[in-house]
Image (spheres, rainbow, N blue to C red):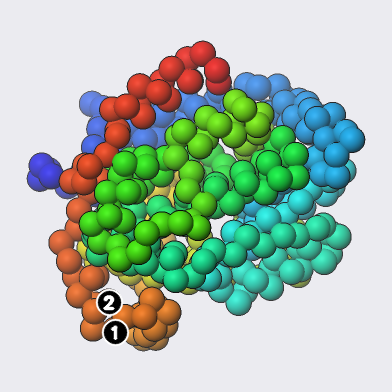
Amino acid sequence: MIQRDYQQCVRCVMDTTDPEIQFDEKGICNHCTGFIARRREIREMGKAGTEHYESLIQRIKKKGKGRKYDALLGISGGVDSSYAAYLLKKSGVRVLLVHMDNGWNSDDANLNIRNVCRVLGLEYESYVLDWEEFKDIQLAFLKASVVEAETPTDIAIQGALHRIAAENKIKFIISGCNYATEGILPKFWHYNARDTKYFNSIVKKFGTRKVKLFPNFGYLTEIYYKFIKGIRVLYLLNYIDYNKMDAMSVLEKDLGWKYYGGKHYESRFTKFIQSYMLPRKFDLDYRKATLSSQICAGDVSREQALEILKEPIYNESDIEKDKEYIAKKLSISKEELNKIVELPGKYYNEYPNDEKKLNFIYNIYRKYFS
């Protein structure tokens, strides 16, 4: 990568730890400029999105007539998916909750899922990955030393949700992903999980098993489910005035929901990757992307975000316990895990990939079908 002098955006807190970040003459970055423009487009869909939200709810119900469920929602036990379940129940949508179980959920997250299902009276299904196969895939990505250590989980979530939706003849998958807290995420921090060439190149080079049971989800699979099965993914939280802190308060009060300590920390593996490995290997602090999204959404000030970033991203005393747990679960020694963490970091473009092909395909899709 080309070395650059350090610079941080004067409006948000994104900086040159994203190798491709760009700044205008005022020192404002392309990430927050793009976020604000896109959020404005979303807000203009009706009165702050409310009209569009209500029309989507009616569309979901209409499509679900004659079927057992109107929609499927992937649930992790985190804030966003739990709050989406809460809203769907309030709106009278018959929703099936599905959790893709990769073996890493924290106890708090598991309790949250149970409470959401119990209090709201929603049906629930778990898609459990073959652990030995998935463990080998995760180890392959760790040994590849790329930023995308979580790509196998991202792929499996989409694969599992679409399979279960198709089995139940459900036409809408509701995602808790939202622009307010996740609108900013640099490509070099999280490359396209639909790139099967990239995935296969890493598994082939660093894995030890053939992938047989893993619910893969590349661009061809996505095309199949979208155009042959007619399944659509909807991001309902984009069409309400979504504030994460307010959502947490509602969940804690009404559902007995419990906070687990950080964004995506409902997974113990994700917590380890984002709070320890990525900062060590890439000087990459995921909090910058989340906080920048929240700044642009008006949920926190830049000054507040800068103060939060001064706080340690991980606790030194806890990390050794986490290492022991992660290593044991992956069937490697703690020493081997430490060696993996200390490997020089690599980016997606250092492995075979289909970036140009995917850009071409998705540009056509956005132009003619979105």
Q: Position of residue 72 (x, y in %)?
A: 72, 46
Q: In this image, 43 relative to 204: left or right?
A: right
What kind of residue is marked 1? Ser
What kind of residue is marked 2? Leu
How would you rate the neighbour count of disc 2 (Cα within 10 Å): few for under 14, some for 14-19, many for 20 or more? some
Residue ranking furthest to the top: 368
Q: Position of residue 145 (x, y in %)?
A: 24, 60
Give the position of the N terminus as an image quadrant.
top left
Q: Position of residue 163 (x, y in %)?
A: 62, 46
* Image: 230 above or below 279: above
Q: In this image, 218 relative to 124: left or right?
A: left
Q: Is residue 305 visible?
A: no
**Real-space Cα distance between discs 2 and 1?**
6 Å
Of 64 and 346, which appears nearest the observer? Answer: 64
Q: In this image, 310 relative to 341: left or right?
A: right
User: Which residue carries the number 1 mark?
Assistant: 333
**Dot 2: what SS?**
helix
- Tell me which residue sits at (76%, 51%) in the image: 96
Of 30 and 324, which appears nearest the observer? Answer: 324
Q: Position of residue 276 (x, y in %)?
A: 33, 69
* Image: 183 above or below 139: above
User: Which residue carries the number 2 mark?
Assistant: 337
